[in-house]
Amino acid sequence: MSLYSVVVPVYNSEHTLKELYTRLEKVFRETIKEPFELILVDDGSKDRSYEVMTELRNNDHRVKIVQMARNFGQHPALLCGFSIAKGDFIVTMDDDLQHPPEELPKLVNVMRQRDDVDAIIASYEGRKHNPIRRLGTKVSVWATSKMLGKDPNLQITSFRLIRRFLVEAMVKTTTHLPQIGNLLIQTSNRIINVPIHHAERAYGHSGYSFKRLMKDLIYDITSHTAFPLIVVRNLGIASFLVSLVMAIVFLVRFFLYGTSVEGWTSTMLVLLAFFGITLLSIGIIGTYLMNILNESKKLPRYVVRRKETDDDEN
């Protein structure tokens, strides 16, 4: 018998938690037929989520609950859940019921059959996210493929089934703002997709706005690759070569034909272009320096306000 730890980051989900638990419990009892624990990590919710979590815990001690001191984000919340997970396999899924618990056996069955697979990531059939979220996901997948050498056909989603040894490796990371998908790719190349049904969001709306998606993408790029710096370097080289060629042409025209260079507008356009490239370069370098500063501070990735687990009670 294998123990499964289901880790769910919770944020303003008072309306979905009871249904999530009920459906998960039924799936493990009737379909998977293996023991499980449900780890709910409240990531600074502003509603009654923690009260609902406490109620679930009181009714079933397989439910372990953690409350963060503030909103640290989905990925630190997952790492917090990983740190107390006891399972041989760890499941990550969202709290909004867009990951139907009834689809989990598809991942489990493949993992049972494939000893050569370390992690399974669900790929969505008929993704139900809004257009902005879908666009952001496509851009992120493309960027991650370029940065980390990932297979571009491998979808990265938050519905996963992972072997314990990978989770133990990820918990040891000291990255300031870890991304679970990126950590997975960096720790194993034995990762596959299994298609599942993606459900409509039952309540509320996604916390991933366009601004949030762009912020995460910029952080991913500046934390895992020197691509922006290489682009700026190449722009500088190209600009120097163009200016050198133009200088030679203008000198030849002046000495052979007596033609002088005129045009205040063209001069200003060239200056503005170079100033723009210079400011862009400073901004990119500043972003890298800020990431280095944040890493050097060694700030905690999350702070636990309180938790209720069997270990605490014992």
Image (cartoon, helix red, strand yellow):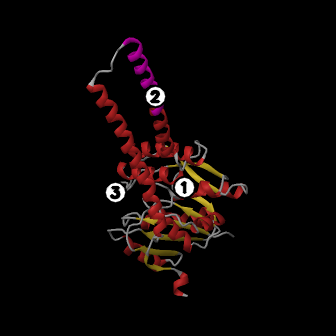
Residue 254 coordinates in the image, percent (x, y): 38, 17
Badges 1 and 3: C-beta atoms under 8 Å apart?
A: no
Q: Is residue 118 left or right of residue 224?
A: right
> According to the image, label 1 marks what residue?
181
Whole-Å distance between the Cαs marked 1 and 3?
25 Å
Q: Position of residue 18 (x, y in %)?
A: 43, 68
Which is more N-terminal, label 3 or label 2?
Answer: 3
Residue sitting at x 57%, y 72%? 85
Of the image marks 1 and 3, the number of the one nearer the N terminus: 1
Asked if 149 appears above or below 172 in the picture, the reply is above
Element carrying mark 2: helix
Q: Residue at x 50, y 75 (%)?
A: 64
Quadrant of the drawing holding the C terminus: bottom right
The amino acid at mark 3 is Gly
Residue type (three-letter) at the residue carrying disc 1:
Gly
Which residue type does callout 2 highlight? Leu
Q: Which residues are magenta?
A: 240-257
